[in-house]
């Protein structure tokens, strides 16, 4: 198993070394789409399975369980290849970190904007709360005023009822008095008639 891993690692490193150093032609890695001497190297390099080679390299390294085996294979890697791979990974990681920092900065800006919106909403809620409280006080004042007017209206209605009752009573008394006056007039007429008759008899 270790031998197979070593062979896989050596083959992957050799292919990567050839790709990086440019010592191998596009025909060595061509899948039939690039023809030697006709297609530019950049076109063929873009179509090469670099990612597959890197994945094979990772698998081969994972198959090497002993650190001594990895060190032995690393010592066999050409210096330019190791340097180029190191610089490539460092540049890639720096770009990833840069994008991560930019994303973090964007997140911070968004967080700051959300905090600003939150403060603005809190201020608006506070203003609306004050307005609602002021309107509530006005409503309570109007309710108190309405209650006072309602009490006055009830008192006026009661006085009106009493006045109506009093007027009704006076009207009744008036009718009674008029009836009595009429009776007295009739009695007076009768008495005057009797008096005249008596005077005539005396004559």
Image (cartoon, helix red, strand yellow):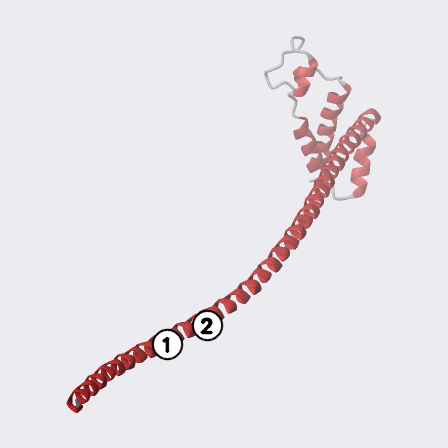
Across and down, in percent, residue 46 comes to 67, 20
Residue pointed to by mark 2 = 159
Where is residue 54 drawn, in percent x and y? 70, 31
Residue shown at the point (65%, 25%) measured from the top left: 49
Earlier-in-chain disc, 2 versus 1: 2
Q: Is residue 199 shown left or right of residue 83?
A: left
> Could you tell me which quadrant the C terminus lies in?
bottom left
Q: Is residue 66 above or below residue 7?
A: below
The part of the image, by quadrant, that contains residue 193 is bottom left
Real-space Cα separation, disc 2 to disc 1, in angstroms: 16 Å
Left or right of residue 176: residue 102: right
Mark 2 and mark 1 in contact? Answer it, CB < 8 Å: no
Q: Nearer the viewer, residue 75 or 57?
A: 57
Q: Is residue 168 above or below residue 99?
A: below
Which residue is pictured at 77% across the width and 20% down the height?
Answer: 21
Residue 112 location in percent, x, y? 73, 42
Looking at the picture, how far across and down is residue 103, in whole percent?
72, 37
Which of pointers 2 and 1 indicates the residue nearer the eye?
Answer: 1
Q: Is residue 4 left or right of residue 199?
A: right
Q: Secondary structure at mark 2?
A: helix
Q: Which residue is mark 1?
A: 170
For the N terminus, the image quarter is top right
Residue 150, numbered label: none
Residue at position x 42%, y 75% from top?
A: 162
């Amino acid at each position: 198993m270790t031998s197979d891993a070593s062979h896989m690692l050596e083959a992957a490193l050799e292919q990567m070394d050839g790709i990086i150093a440019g010592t191998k032609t596009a025909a060595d890695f061509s899948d039939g789409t690039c023809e030697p001497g006709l297609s530019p190297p950049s076109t063929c390099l873009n179509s090469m399975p670099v990612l597959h080679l890197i994945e094979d390299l990772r698998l081969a390294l994972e198959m090497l369980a002993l650190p001594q085996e990895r060190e032995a294979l690393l010592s066999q890697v050409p210096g330019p290849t190791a340097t180029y791979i190191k610089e490539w990974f460092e540049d890639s990681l720096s770009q990833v970190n840069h994008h991560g920092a930019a994303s973090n900065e964007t997140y911070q800006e968004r967080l700051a904007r959300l905090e600003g919106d939150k403060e603005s909403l809190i201020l608006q809620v506070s203003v609306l709360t004050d307005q609602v409280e002021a309107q509530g006080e006005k409503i309570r004042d109007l309710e108190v005023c309405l209650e006072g007017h309602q009490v006055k209206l009830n008192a006026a209605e009661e006085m009106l009822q009493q006045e109506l009752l009093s007027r009704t009573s006076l009207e009744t008394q008036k009718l009674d008095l008029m009836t009595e006056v009429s009776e007295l007039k009739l009695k007076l007429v009768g008495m005057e008639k009797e008096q005249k008759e008596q005077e005539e008899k005396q004559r």
